[in-house]
């Protein structure tokens, strides 16, 4: 919980927005139009469970319709409230603009602890919530497209998509009403890993930025860098897995709600994830030291700190003691506005949430396009690509034989070169390109303007500028 003298998550988003627009030359009316939330729908509905009617409260907020459909996840949490949903919807607007996903910003939430209900009960609750939103066009492939968020997964998205199809039986694009679905229900390969993969690509982009590395006081590449992960859910798990397995990072600490694990030699991410899956806790894991007060590990020495769970975990009560020179916000709003100011003064570099966790909405965009086109990525061109590559390999081997050169192509090269790009490879390629391009836009502002001393302000400047141009194109 944030200290009492600190602004709320909603206020933090507004403060960061105001800090950026103060550096822009926007008409006051346009500035206000971009800042405010367009609409929030609150629904209270009943579901008969365990012999009686239970009433639930849910929200769907639309922050900006400068582009449609609007996009944003649905979270299930007892902490869900209107202010939080509206703040998250605003972040979605800026996030989509930053990575050039053609959506406005939206967000949804249901005030519920999903652990209190079995799967059948959750399906009844989800379908009723979806029904209430669908009949008001708050879920629609052309108007408002949800996705998974904290407490939800591809399972809930499949239920919502099926509910939409039941209510709109002739909508040929109905499966595009929601993203993050299972593969066999219209999903796309790489969506589950997308946000964590995006964090990895964001860090790779940062480590290619020599000026950024200098400002963070870091040298070299990702190999051997000590990383602390807070939250081993879907995002934290995939980010930790890819960084350790593919980039050579050492995951020195994993923080969960009931404590933290620490090992200077690096933790086995798969083993820890498996342990949590079996036991529901990090307690008892044998190959690491256990710290009961997990929040203390946010202040431990490391090279990269990745908060990947809740908002506000780094705040005025602990910001001064955070030692990481680089923080990458895999969660939404993990650093409060007050803490952000403290950290900036210390020289800490923060890769902001609106960029760092944009992998999810980027691949959701790919899934939406796939659903509207009604064809799997790679289906048309993959074999033709493989055939062209085979021609090159055959010609090289023929020339070698004719000229007696003795060339041989390694089997590993041939296997990789001859394999055409399938859906997963194309998704990862598109995500990598998106994250690289967005980082270049941010870092250009960061390094070229004397009045911009941090990546968050740079990200807001880029995204707000794009939203403003969209409104101007509409005649506003």
Image (spheres, helix red, strand yellow):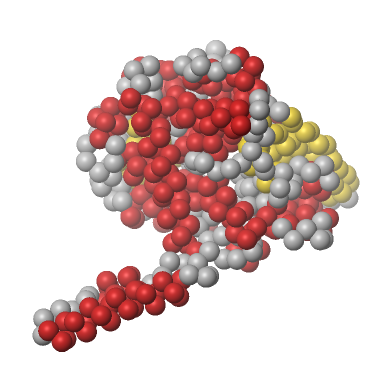
Horizontal relation, residue 431 to residue 409: left or right: right
| Residue 413 appears in the picture as rendered | yes
Expressed as whole percent of the image width and height from the top left, the position of residue 148 reads: 62, 48
Expressed as whole percent of the image width and height from the top left, the position of residue 133 reads: 79, 43
- All told, the count of numbered labels is 0
Q: Nearer the viewer, residue 289 or 438?
A: 438
Residue 369 vertical position relative to residue 235 in the rendered view, above or below: below
Q: Which of 261 and 207 is in front in this view?
A: 207
Q: Nearer the viewer, residue 241 or 30?
A: 30
Q: Toward which corner of the image does residue 254 lie, by quadrant?
A: top left
Q: Nearer the viewer, residue 114 or 137?
A: 137
Q: Toward which corner of the image does residue 421 lie, by quadrant?
A: bottom left
Residue 200 vertical position relative to residue 310 in the rendered view, above or below: below
User: What's the residue at 34%, 55% (across, down)?
Assistant: 245
Q: Which residue lies furthest to the top in this view?
A: 5
Q: Which residue lies furthest to the right in this view?
A: 52
User: What's the residue at 53%, 51% (across, down)?
Assistant: 363
User: What's the residue at 57%, 27% (across, down)?
Assistant: 468
User: What's the residue at 71%, 28% (across, down)?
Assistant: 38
Horizontal relation, residue 319 to residue 378: left or right: left
Horizontal relation, residue 209 to residue 182: left or right: left
Expressed as whole percent of the image width and height from the top left, the position of residue 174 reads: 73, 57
| Residue 89 appears in the picture as rendered | no
Expressed as whole percent of the image width and height from the top left, the position of residue 32 reads: 63, 19
Quadrant of the drawing holding the N terminus: top right
Quadrant of the drawing holding the C terminus: top right
């Amino acid at each position: 919980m944030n200290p009492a003298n600190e602004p709320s998550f909603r206020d933090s988003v507004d403060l960061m927005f105001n800090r950026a627009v103060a550096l822009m030359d926007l008409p006051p009316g346009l500035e206000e139009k971009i800042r405010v939330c367009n609409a929030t729908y609150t629904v209270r509905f009943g579901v008969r469970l365990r012999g009686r009617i239970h009433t639930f409260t849910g929200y769907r907020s639309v922050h900006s319709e400068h582009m449609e459909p609007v996009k944003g996840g649905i979270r299930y949490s007892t902490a869900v409230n209107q202010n939080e949903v509206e703040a998250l919807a605003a972040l979605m607007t800026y996030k989509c603009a930053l990575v050039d996903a053609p959506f406005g910003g939206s967000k949804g939430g249901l005030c519920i602890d999903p652990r209190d209900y079995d799967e059948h009960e959750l399906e009844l609750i989800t379908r009723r919530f979806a029904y209430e939103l669908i009949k008001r066009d708050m879920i629609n492939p052309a108007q408002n497209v949800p996705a998974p968020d904290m407490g939800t997964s591809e399972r809930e998205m499949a239920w919502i998509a099926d509910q939409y199809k039941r209510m709109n039986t002739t909508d040929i694009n109905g499966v595009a009403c929601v993203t993050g679905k299972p593969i066999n229900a219209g999903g796309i390969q790489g969506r589950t890993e997308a946000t964590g993969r995006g964090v990895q690509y964001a860090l790779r982009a940062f480590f290619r930025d020599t000026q950024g590395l200098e400002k963070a006081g870091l040298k070299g590449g990702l190999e051997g860098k000590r990383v602390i992960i807070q939250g081993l859910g879907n995002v934290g798990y995939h980010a930790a897995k890819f960084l350790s397995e593919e980039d050579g990072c050492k995951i020195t600490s994993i923080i969960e709600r009931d404590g933290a694990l620490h090992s200077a030699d690096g933790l086995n991410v798969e083993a820890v994830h498996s342990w949590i899956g079996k036991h529901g806790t990090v307690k008892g894991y044998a190959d690491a030291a256990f710290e009961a007060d997990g929040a203390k590990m946010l202040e431990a020495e490391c090279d990269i700190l990745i908060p990947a769970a809740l908002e506000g975990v780094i705040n005025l009560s602990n910001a001064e003691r955070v030692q990481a020179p680089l923080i990458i916000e895999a969660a939404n709003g993990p650093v409060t506005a007050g803490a952000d100011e403290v950290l900036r003064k210390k020289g800490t570099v923060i890769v902001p949430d609106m960029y760092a966790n944009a992998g999810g909405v980027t691949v959701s965009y790919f899934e939406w396009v796939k659903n509207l086109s009604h064809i799997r990525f790679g289906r048309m061109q993959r074999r033709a690509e493989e055939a062209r590559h085979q021609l090159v390999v055959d010609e090289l081997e023929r020339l070698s034989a004719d000229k007696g050169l003795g060339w041989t192509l390694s089997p590993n090269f041939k296997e990789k070169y001859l394999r055409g790009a399938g859906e997963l490879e194309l998704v990862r390629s598109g995500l990598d390109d998106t994250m690289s391009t967005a980082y270049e836009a941010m870092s250009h502002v960061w390094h070229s303007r004397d009045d911009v001393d941090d990546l968050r302000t740079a990200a807001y400047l880029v995204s707000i500028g794009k939203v403003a141009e969209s409104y101007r194109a509409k005649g506003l």
